[in-house]
Each structure stands twice: as C-alpha cells, then as structure tokens.
C-alpha cells in the first residue's frame, strides 16, 4: 500500500503523458500559427521541465512545513478544515501557481504539465518518506489521488487562463483556486469520519481531471 503513496504520482504522470505522446498528432508538434515564443519553447525537451519541477519542489518542501503549521490543529470544524487545507493543499498549489504565473508565464501547456509532474512527484515522495507512524487511507490513497488530479487540472486551468481573456480567464482562475479547496474538503470529510463522502469527493475531482484530457490538445 505504501508503494502507491511513494510511486503512484510519477507512475500516473507517465501514464497520463504517454511518454510525451499525451497530446498526440499535430498538437504535440505545435502549429505553424503559434507565436514565436512558443515556437522557441517547442525546441526544448519537456523532460527538462520534469526535472525543473522536481528541483523547484526541493526548497518548496522545506518551506511548506512551517507554512502548514500556520493554522494549528483543532477539532472545531472550520479551523480543522483550514488546518488540513493549509497543510496538504493550499500552499502546495499556491507555490505551483507562483511558478506558473512568474517564470513559466510564457510556457505552453505541455511545459506546465511536465513541470507540475516533477513538482508533485517529488512532493509526494518526500511527504511519504517523511511520514511517521501508521498512515491511514487518506495519506496512502486519497492524498496521492488528489495530487494526481492537481497534476492534470492545475496546468490545464492555468493555460486556459493564459490563452483566454475576460470572463473566461476569470472563470479558469476561479476553478484553479477551487481545486485545492476541494482537496481540503476531502481531507476534512475524512477527518470527520465520513470516508465515503471523502472518497466520493476525491473521485469527482479525479474524474474532472480525466475529463479535461481531451481538451488539452486545444491549447498549445
């Protein structure tokens, strides 16, 4: 069971990307109408972004530990939700968003996706190795599954926000923010001893991530 927490995210990333054939056909090679910056970007191997994302996750992991303790543990429902949200979801997604909207702002979806794969893979591996004591179903299965969903959804929504404008861009950003909030809700439901609802929430998010795959090729 621990193998899923350790290796599930990188294995899922390789499966989802199809060893760089995720976008298949002409979309994987780019289109002649792409802007020059994107054309230059296509000359880079996306696997460098996989490594880049893993390297970016190293300082993030040590930064996330104190950030996750900003809201102390509590049995009060709202404070408990905030604690779980900050510990496992919000700040992780926030640091990834920081990369997406700063030094990766000009990157296309494939670069963002490979970067996110490296980032979440290393964070998941480090979290599993750093865990102490008996791990429950949330840490072994639900949390890695939620990170798999984020691996697909966050780059997709960020790329949508970059290519769109007005209400469409705002809608993509709102959905981007909802992904970690939904992850926090899953953690809270499990902590409140509602594992079936927590599993349903995680499955819904995972289904949304898989449903987004056919639309990825619409974005450069």
Image: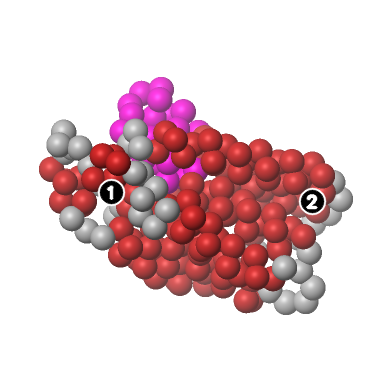
Instruction: Please provide percent x and percent y for residue 101.
Output: 35, 47
Task: Give the magenta part as a residue range.
Answer: 153-174
The circle on residue 88 is: none
Looking at this rendering, what residue extends furthest in the top direction?
167
> Which residue is at a point 44% across and 35% down the rendered structure image?
214
Instruction: Please provide percent x and percent y for residue 197.
Output: 79, 41
Q: Is residue 156 magenta?
A: yes
Looking at this rendering, what residue extends furthest in the front direction?
25
Q: Nearer the viewer, residue 163 or 1?
A: 1
Badge 2 crowding class, 10 Å Cα cut-off, few under 14, some 14 to 19, many 20 or more, is some
Name the quarter where the N terminus is drawn: bottom right
Badge 1 crowding class, 10 Å Cα cut-off, few under 14, some 14 to 19, many 20 or more, is some
Name the quarter where the C terminus is drawn: top left
Please say whether residue 30 is visible from this viewpoint.
yes
> Which residue is at a point 38% across and 35% down the rendered structure image?
160
The circle on residue 190 is: 2
**Image position of 116 (left or right of 45):** right
Q: Nearer the viewer, residue 217 or 113?
A: 217
Please say whether residue 77 is visible from this viewpoint.
no
The circle on residue 107 is: 1
Quadrant of the rendered image containing residue 36: top left
Secondary structure of the residue carrying numbered label 2: helix
> Which residue is at a point 49% across and 36% down the rendered structure image?
212
116, above or below 153, in the image: below
> Which residue is at a point 36% across and 23% down the rendered structure image?
166
Instruction: Please provide percent x and percent y for residue 179.
Output: 57, 42
| Earlier residue among tags 1 and 2 | 1
Q: Is residue 80 magenta?
A: no
**Image position of 6 (left or right of 152):** right
154, above or below 19, in the image: above
**Image position of 197 (left or right of 145):** right
């Amino acid at each position: 069971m621990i193998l899923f927490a350790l290796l599930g995210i990188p294995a899922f990333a390789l499966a989802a990307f199809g060893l760089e054939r995720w976008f298949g056909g002409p979309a994987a090679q780019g289109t002649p109408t792409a802007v020059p910056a994107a054309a230059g970007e296509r000359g880079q191997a996306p696997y460098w972004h996989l490594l880049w994302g893993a390297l970016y996750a190293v300082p993030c992991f040590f930064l996330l530990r104190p950030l996750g303790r900003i809201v102390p543990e509590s049995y009060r429902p709202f404070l408990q939700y905030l604690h779980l949200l900050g510990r496992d979801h919000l700040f992780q997604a926030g640091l990834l968003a920081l990369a997406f909207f700063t030094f990766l702002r000009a990157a296309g979806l494939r670069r963002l996706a490979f970067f996110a794969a490296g980032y979440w893979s290393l964070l998941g591996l480090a979290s599993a190795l750093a865990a102490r004591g008996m791990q429950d179903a949330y840490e072994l299965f639900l949390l890695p599954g939620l990170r798999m969903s984020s691996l697909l959804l966050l780059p997709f929504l960020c790329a949508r926000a970059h290519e769109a404008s007005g209400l469409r861009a705002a809608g993509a950003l709102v959905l981007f923010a909802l992904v970690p909030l939904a992850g926090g809700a899953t953690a809270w439901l499990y902590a409140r001893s509602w594992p079936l609802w927590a599993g349903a929430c995680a499955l819904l998010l995972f289904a949304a991530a898989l449903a987004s795959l056919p639309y990825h090729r619409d974005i450069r």
